[in-house]
Image (cartoon, grey):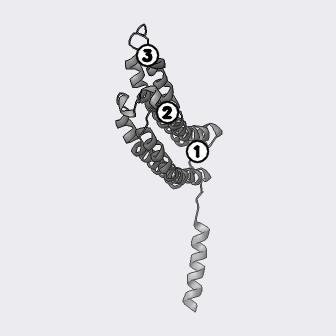
Amino acid sequence: MKNLGRALILMGQMRRNERGAIDIGGILIMGIGMVFLAVGFIMFPIVTTATDALLAYNCTESLGNITSAYFTGFIPIIGITPLLVLIGYLSAAVFSMYLGVKIMKGGEGDTKLDLGTTLLLGISLIFIAIGLIILPVALDGICTVIYGGGAGINAAYTGLLPILRVTPLLILISFVSGAVISGFFGIKKLAA
């Protein structure tokens, strides 16, 4: 009993000597990392369903039966998009958690959690969703131009067909790049 009393007194003295600060910004950044992880696994089945639909794309019979294989470089990029999305979300989650732990270890780290940073992170998620929503609409529009009312593309439009065939690839790459860039700057502003 005597030793227990001494142990309690010693623990009380040790507790009084503790000094430190908890940075709420570090905890919030770690929370953002968990959100990235959750949203990544929530969006992954949605992305694979959308990319499956894009891989199986087929214009209506009246438009000349154009499939997704008709478009230059489109199938390989669609095929790798789910992997890129998953790796992107996992990387953002790991990086956010790392920043949160780094700030927490540093004690009184300076974090700037403002609306602009949060919007950049949110916009990165929106870019992927909008890209996968807009792409089938763009494909239908491109097929309509290629079909040209049954006559094909007007011969006066020099070089239009090769550009139209690569346009879906450019659209997809631009939306994925927009997601990566806005997400990168959002995370970078958190660390600044």
* Residue 93 percent across, percent down from the top left: 48, 50
Could you classify mark 3 by the number of other residues whose Cα lies within 10 Å: few (under 14), some (14-19), or many (20 or more)? few
> What is the CA distance from the residue labelled 1 to the residue labelled 2?
38 Å
For the residues labelled 1 and 3, the Cα–Cα distance comes to 61 Å
Residue tagged 1: 111
Type of amino acid at the residue the image marks with label 2: Leu
Residue drawn 62% across the image and 69% down it: 16
Query: Which element is circle 3 on?
Result: loop
Residue drawn where x is 51% and y is 39% of the image: 128
Give the residue number, with chain letter if any, for mark 3.
151
Give the residue number, with chain letter if any, for mark 2. Answer: 135
Whichever of labels 1 and 2 marks the residue nearer the N terminus, that label is 1
Residue 69: where, in percent of width, then height? 35, 33
Pointer 1 or 3: first along the chain: 1
On residue 183, the disc is: none
Count of picture labels? 3
CA–CA distance between discs 2 and 3? 24 Å
* Point 44% across, 42% down: residue: 51
Residue 192 visible in this rendered orientation of the protein: no
Callout 1 touching callout 2 (CB < 8 Å): no
- Amino acid type of the residue tagged 1 in the rendering: Thr
Seen in the picture, residue 153 relative to 178 is either above or below; the reply is above
Nearer the observer, 91 or 4: 91
SS state under label 1: loop
Front-most of residues 16 and 90: 90
